[in-house]
Amino acid sequence: MQTFAEELREITQDLKSVLTRYTALRERMLEASKNSKTDDDLVEEFKRWVAGEMDAHDQAVAEVKQSMRRAFAEEEIGLDLPEGADSVSFAKLQP
């Protein structure tokens, strides 16, 4: 059983890891958004969005969400995900 200090240290490390990934993803998004977009570019982007295609922002959000789901599944639920697993279905986790 972990002490409060050990658990706090572990949570702090997890937060640092998430923040590091978030910062890197945010930098990618900012770099992608530097290009000025015309009305035609925005129309095309909207069409891609309606078709379900993901842009840099959508991909960054999906990666952060997946990271959080995986951490929750492994740490809070105690689920031992196989190496390389990148998806967790919460429907499968229900008793």
Image: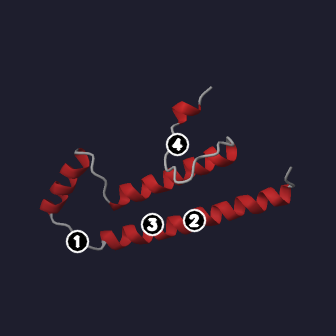
Residue 78 in which image quadrant: top right
Going from the N terminus, do you reach mark 4 or mark 1 first?
A: 1
- Please rate how many residues cluster around mark 4, counting C-alpha atoms within 10 Å: few if below 14, some from 14 to 19, many from 20: some
Nearer to us: label 3 or label 1: 3
Disc 4 is placed on an element classified as loop
- Alpha-carbon span between mark 3 and mark 2: 10 Å
Label number found at residue 25:
3
Tell me the element at label 1. loop
Disc marking residue 19 = 2
**Which residue is disc 4 drawn over?**
88
Kind of residue indicated by mark 4? Val
Closer to the N terminus: mark 2 or mark 4?
Answer: 2
Location of residue 27 (image quadrant)? bottom left
The image quarter in which residue 20 lies? bottom right
The residue carrying pointer 3 sits among few (fewer than 14), some (14 to 19) or many (20 or more) residues within 10 Å by Cα, namely: some
Q: Which residue matches tag 1? A: 36
Q: CA distance from mark 4 to mark 3?
A: 21 Å
Q: Position of residue 12 (x, y in %)?
A: 71, 63
Residue at 23 percent across and 45 percent down: it is 50
